[in-house]
Amino acid sequence: MEGTFGKFISSPLFTFIIGPEKKEFTVHSKPLADISSTLNALMNGEMMEAKVRRVEWPDVDEDTFVRLCEYAYLQDYSTPPRPLPRSVQSFEEWGERQPGMSKKERKKYYKKYLQGLGQTDEPVAEPVPEEAPVEAEPVPEPEEEPLEPIADAGPRELPYREASIWTGHLQDKFTQFALPPIPVKTESNPLSNLYYDDFKAVFEGHVRLYVLADKYGIQPLCFIVLHKLYETLKQFKIDSESVTAVMEFVRCVYSDTLKHAKEGPALRDLATRYMVSVLGQIGDELQFSQLLEEGGDFVADFWRMLWKPGN
């Protein structure tokens, strides 16, 4: 059959059994075989898996496998979706979380909050009086002062502080990361977090795909993941809640990548540079101290980045 796509859909089928739930995905073998010589040997070589046309991947989750297949066909993959927000059930419940606000201020902020959730058409629920009030002459309301953005009503964004280590020059460490070239233009679609977002799943989705691509020698996909992660981290806002996602991102990178993996050091370098660049924001945070107390390769990499000649 002529054409790349025709060859794809006419190639022999192969079944991947994914994750602890043993979900079966039966796919055409050529798209995956074309992006990795290791996968080609697995599906079309002399191994037992090639003969039975099945393999078990218990350590790969379903979303990561789907992104791998998406890349095999399109040379790109969809950014892991923004998680569902930590929403509230009512105007009264939301107001309880905003001490020191008048009812009018809470109402205006709540409308902005709904807009952030994509619920712009949802009316704000207010208690209905049992009896109609006696009409009175309308009293002109005082002119409203402009309100601060909605983000100020949530967890505080961590300020950048100077400490005994002169952190001002460290902010550039992240932007100095040498992004590898990618063969085709991809859609980075970076997500900018809001205070009610939990970005742990977004970061882990990128990292898991990177680890799988590195394991099977798919270097172009590793490069694309680095680009997408870089753009996401560049826009990430660190506050008193989102700092948790940053720490979990570093743990995920260092627990899932080997020190001497083919492309592992590049992902570790990106994570370390990011942490160094935001040291002025996270240096006083308990969670950062706990991360350092765990020891391991990250602590060594972090210190080497701080102590590099020219810092």
Image (tube, grey):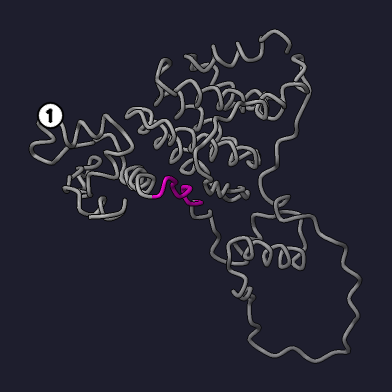
Residue occupying the point 61% across, 12% down = 303
Q: Please, is residue 271 above or below residue 228 in the view?
A: above
Q: Quadrant of the N terminus?
A: bottom left
Q: Position of residue 108 (x, y in %)?
A: 73, 66
Residue most extreme to the front:
2
Q: Which residues are magenta?
A: 74-82
Mark 1 neighbour density, 10 Å: few (under 14) some (14–19) many (20 or more): few
| Magenta stretch contains residue 16 | no
- Left or right: where 145 falls relative to 300: right
Q: Would you say the magenta stretch is mainly helix, strand or loop?
A: loop
Q: Position of residue 168 (x, y in %)?
A: 78, 23
- Left or right: where 192 falls relative to 264: right
| Magenta stretch contains residue 77 | yes
- 116 and 58: which one is in front? 58
Q: Please, is residue 124 above or below residue 151 in the view?
A: below
Location of residue 264 by image quarter: top left
- 30 and 16: which one is in front? 30
Q: Secondary structure at mark 1?
A: loop
Quickly name the residue at label 1: 47
Q: Position of residue 197 (x, y in %)?
A: 56, 49
- 14 and 103: which one is in front? 14
